Amino acid sequence: MSALATWWMAARPATLTASIAPVIVGTAHAARDGSTHWPAALAALVGAMLIQVGTNLVNDVEDFERGADDAGRSGPARAVERGLLTAAQVRRGALLSFAAAAAVGCYLITVGGWPILVLGLVSILSGIAYTAGPWPLAYLGLGDVFVFLFFGIAAVCGTYFVQTGAVTIPVVLSGTAIGALATAILAVNNTRDVDGDRGAGKRTLAVRFGPAATRAEYALLLAWAFAVPIELSRQVSSGAVLLALLAAPWVPVLIRRIYSASGSALNPLLRDTARLELAFAALLSIGLLL
């Protein structure tokens, strides 16, 4: 592989829907409320993606060194595990990604003030602590909480706040829907990797409670996400947000697939759940604008 292709693979571009979707929804709420700030919205998008790439790179190194990623893993190839990049190279890449996110954050702080400073610092530190440090969140079974909060509520509300200077109940509600769908992606990942994670001491929810529990979690997360537009339509006094329910026919199909597959057979479901999140975010945003 070329160097560019290798780094592109290590960044895991297919997962970046988790950082794109909340910015789309937060900006749509801001536009609905007549407070769109396009430079801030663009900076929020770039910053969120950079933090996710940094988190992915740290995960690449740490999971390999802790034994969670080896030649027998069911998921897509990882750069350090395959020997395509050294651990030192990937760590430097993660540091560069987080530094670039911090640079973007400096502009956002001038727009949104100290709350954005706090949110940015906590987001970066949590991205590192997801799989690194003495108490990595993913290894303690807290990965689902991390994803729900930071790729859902915090990202949607932060995007809205930096454009409006406020946070509203409808925005928080939308954040829970996006967070649920992002966490559903992780539930598929953890169900797929349960055997390898157990051997490496990575105590994900799938390891702690078994794959049956994370399959049920997946179904509940999707159900929650698609229940949100119904309540949101009452909060914003508009039925247009129900447009998000156009993606609902995918839900039973995806739930059947997580119950009927395991191991590497879950990789396509991982991709399709990410696509569902992006489609939901797009449709919800169009509904908000209408």
Image: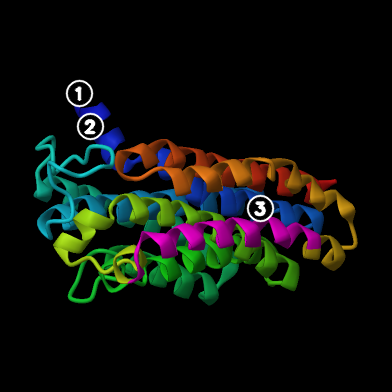
Sequence-wise, the earlier of marks 3 and 2 is: 2
Q: Is residue 12 above or below residue 234?
A: above
Name the residue type under label 2: Thr
**How would you rate the neighbour count of disc 3 (Cα within 10 Å): few for under 14, some for 14-19, many for 20 or more?**
many
Q: What's drawn in magenta, residue-wise?
A: 209-230
Q: Which residue is mark 2?
A: 6
Between residue 179 and residue 161, name the one nearer to us. 179
- Callout 2: helix, strand or loop? helix
Residue 252 location in percent, x, y?
62, 46
Q: Are marks 1 and 2 in contact (CB under 8 Å)?
A: yes
Q: Is residue 185 above or below residue 233?
A: above
Name the residue type under label 3: Val
Q: Is residue 181 above or below residue 208?
A: above
Quarter of the rendering containing residue 35: bottom right
Residue at left 85%, top 49%?
240
Label disc, if present, on residue 25 of the rendered structure: 3
